[in-house]
Amino acid sequence: MIMVTTAVARVLAGDELRARRAAAVTERNLVAFRTGGTYWWLVVSGFAEPLLYLLAIGWGVGALVGDMELPDGRVVPYLTFLAPALLAAAAMNGAIAESTMNFFAKMKFAKLYDSVLNTPVTPVEIAFGELGWAMLRGAMYTGAFLVVMVVLDVTSPVRALAAFPAALLVGFAFGALGMAFATLMRSWQDFDYVGIVQFAVFLFSGTFVPVASYPVAMQVLVQVSPLYHGVELIRSITTGTVGWGHLWHLAYLLAAVVLGLAVAARRMARLLLG
Amino acid sequence: MAHPSVAVLEYQLVGYRRFWRGTVFSSFVMPVLFFLGMGLAVGEYVDRGGGLDLPYQQFIGAGLVAFTGVQIAMIESSFPVLGNFKWQRIYYGMAATPLRVGDMIAGQLGYIGFRIAVAAAAFLLVMIPFGAVTSAWAGLAPLVAVLVGLAVAAPMFAFSATIESANLQAVMFRFALLPMVLFSGVFFPVGQLPELLRPLAYALPLWHGVELCRAAVLGIGTAWPVPVHLGYLGLWVGVGFVLAMARFRRRLAT
Amino acid sequence: MDGGEALIRARGLVKRFGEFTAVDGIDVEVRKGEAFGFLGPNGAGKSSTMRMIGCVSAPTGGELAILGMDPLRQGPAIRARLGVCPQEDNLDIELTARENLTTYARYFGIPRATARRRADQLLEFVQLADRAGSKVDQLSGGMRRRLTIARSLVNEPDIVLLDEPTTGLDPQARHLVWERLFRLKRQGTTLVLTTHYMDEAEQLCDRLVVMDGGRIAAEGSPRELIEQHATREVVELRFGVTALEPFADKLAGIGERLELLPDRILLYADDGDAAAAEVYARNLSPSGVLVRRASLEDVFLHLTGRTLVETG
C-alpha cells in the first residue's frame, strides 16, 4: 500500500524524493501501531464493526426481507445484496476515522506535524503519507471483510479479488475528502456534523435497499454521494453484473480523490506554514 | 436546602446550554435517520416478506426509543467522565467541596436522564405522523428509555473512571454498544438469534428496555412480566452505581 | 572570526502578521562553526526569526539566504541540512524515545539501519540510553528536552537551531543541556539559539544580537557588548525602603552612571569596591551592597531601559 501511495505521489509531483518522504510519514503510523498500546486496540477493533452489521442486518433483518432482485433479473438472498454495500461502507468509515479525527488531533493537539515540517517533508507529502496509512488500514478491513464474504458464499474468490481494488478506491476517495474537511475544521464540535453526514450517507446510498425504491427526489440526490458510486461499483463486481455504465461510478470516485487531495494540500500549506 | 447532587445537575445543565447543538445528532438525528432509513426503506421489503405480524415501521420505531436512551447514556458516560478526571479535572474540584462522591455521580446521572427524556419524547413525536405510535401508554416510553439509559450509564461511569485513554472507550463502543444495539431486538426479534446467543441478549439491559418500550408504544404484551424487566434494569443501575462510587473514590485518592 | 563562511545571511529581514510587525528589518550573519545567539525578552521577534531561518515561515520582506540557498524555493533542500529544537517539545507521544529518533530520521530519507545506529549513538550522547524504550510521557521535562535535542541531530545537520533550549528546566537539567551543547560546539557544529537568559547567552554564544521590539539593538561578542554598553563592574545597592529617588540624588557622580530599579539602585563603575567605599563616605548606609562583574543583563538594561527577565 505504501507502494501505491508513493506511485501516486510520484505521478503528481514528478519527484521520487517526495514519494520517499511521503512514505516516511506512512511509516511513522505503522511504527505507532506496532508499538502497541490502546491505539492498537482501536485499529484492530475496527474489524468488528462491519462484521456485526453484516450479521445483524444481513442475517437478522435479511430473514425478514427474504430475497432481492438484481438489475439483471437474478434473485439473490438479502445477504448477497447487502454485503458488498457494507464493504463499501467499511472502506468509507475506516478512511474517514483516520483522515478526520486522528488527522485533526495530530495537527491541532499533538503538534506532530510541526516537527515533521522542520524536516525536508512538505505539507503535500504529509497529506499523501497520512492518506497512505488510512489506505493501509482500510485495506486490512476490506481484505478481512472480503474473506468473510467468500466464506459465507456471498461472492466467489475471483470476484472478491476484483472487488478489493474497488474497495480501496472508495477508501481513497473518502480519505482524501475527509482530510480536506479536517483542514477546514475549527474544533471537535464540528465532527458532530461530519458524523451526521457520514451516517446519513451510510443509510441512504443504496446500501440497504435498491435506489430504485427511493422517492424520485432522493434518487437524484443520491448521485452526489460518493458512497452510492462505491456501492454500485462493488456490488456489480461481487454479484457479477458489471457493465460499461459502471465506468461513470469509477470516474466519479477518481474525481473525488483528486478534489480532496487538492483542497487538503492547499489548506495544510496555509495552516502549517503561516 | 436542595440535595447537593442538585448542584451537580445544575452545573451540568448550565454547561449544556452552550454545546447542545453538537449533541442533537447523537441524541435525535441518529434515531430519526435509523427510523427513516431502516423503518421506511427496508420496511417496505420486510412487510412484503410478511415475517412480522406488525408493520416494520412500528416494530423498529418502538425499539429505537430504547436505543436513544442507551446511545445518549454511552456517549455521556464515556468521554465526559474521563475528561472530568483527566483533562478538566472537574471532579477533583468538586471533591474539595462538601460534595460526596455519590452526589457527583447522582447529579451527573440525573443530567443524563434529563437528556434522554427530552430526546426520547422528541423522537416519539416524530413517530406519530408515521403511524408508529398506537397506544396512549406511549407517554411512559421516555421514562423506560431513561431507565435503560441509566442501566448502561452507571456501570460505564465505573469503566470510564478506571481507564486512561479515550481509545479504549472507542473499543468499548464497538465491542459492547454496537453488538448490544444490533442484537437486542431493535432491528429484528431476538427469537431469530441462534439459541446459544439468545441468553446474551437477555442478559444485556437493552433488550428489556426494548420490550418495555414496545409494550408502551404499541400497547402489546412483554416477553417477561413487566416487574421482572423493570427490576432487572433497576439492578443494573444499582450495581453500576455502587461500582462507580468505588472507582471514583479510588481515582480521586490519586 | 572574520572571514568565516556565512551560513546564514539576512538583510533587512521583515516578518509581519497582519498589522503586527514581529521582525522589523534585521541584518544578521552567522558564520560556520560559531555559536550565535538571539537575546531578548518574550515578544522581541526571536522565534519569528528562527521560524524564517528554519524555512517554515516565509519572510514578508528583505533577503534571506541559508547555506547559500533561497528558503522560498529550496526549503526542503535547506531543511535537510538543519536541525531544529523548537521552544515547546513536540515529540511523538505515541512512540518510544528510540522510535522518535528512528522515525524522524526517515523523514530525512536516512536508511533504516543507519537510523537505528545513529539513534543509539544520540541516546548515548544525551544520556538517555537507559530510557530508549520509554514512551515520551514517562520522561521528565529535562529528559524530553534532551531527546528533542537528540532528534535535531539525527540528520547530522550543518546548523542546529535551538529556540530557548533551557526555558522551563530546573537548574540541574539546564546544566546538563548546556554541557551537551558545549560538546556539540567543540565538535564544530554551528549553533543558533534564542534565549532570554543572560547566563545562557554568556556561556554558550560566541556572538549575539540583542533584539527588542523586532529590531536589533546591539551586536557583538558577550565581552564586547559588556565593554561597549556597561562598565567592568556594577554595585547593587538596596536601602530597605521603596522610595529610592532621594538616595539616587545623593549618589550622583559616583561611577560612570546609575540605574534606578524598583527595588535597587545599580552603580556602574570600573572599580566597584572604590565606588562602594565612596557610597559609605557620603554617609549613606545601604542595607545591602553587592559588587559584581557587569553582565548582559546590564547591557540590555542600558539599551532598552528595561530588565530582561521581569524581577518580582
Image (cartoon, grey):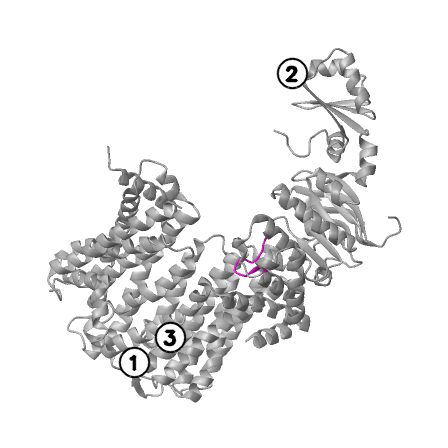
> Disc number at residue A86?
3
The quadrant of the rendering that contains the N terminus of chain A is: bottom right
As drawn, the label of residue A78 is 1
Rendering quarter of residue C188: bottom right
Judging from the image, mark 3 belongs to the subunit labelled A
Residue B163 covered by magenta stretch:
no
Q: Marks 2 and 1: same chain?
A: no
- Residue C183 is at least partly visible in this image: yes
How many other residues sit within 10 Å of disc 1, few (<14), some (14-19) or many (≥20)? many
Front one among C78 and A264 = C78
Horizontal and vertical percent position of residue C312: 61, 29
Q: In the picture provided, is C1 more to the left or to the right than B141?
A: right
Is the magenta region chiefly helix, strand or loop? loop
Tag on residue C243? 2
Residue at point 49%, 78% (across, down): A250
| Picture residue at 49% right of the left edge, 56% below the top | A185
- Magenta region, residue range: C90-97
Look at the numbered discs 2 and 3 and tell me whether their residues touch, using CB distance below 8 Å: no
Q: Distance between the Cα atoms at labels 2 and 1?
A: 91 Å
The answer to which quarter of the image holds residue A241 is: bottom left
In the figure, is residue C270 to the left or right of A163?
A: right
Say above or below: A123 vs A136: above
**Chain of the residue that carries numbered disc 2 in the rendered image:** C
Whether residue A118 is visible here, answered yes or no, is no
Q: Amino acid at mark 2?
A: Ala
Q: Nearer the viewer, residue B58 or B76?
A: B76
Nearer the observer, C65 or A66: C65
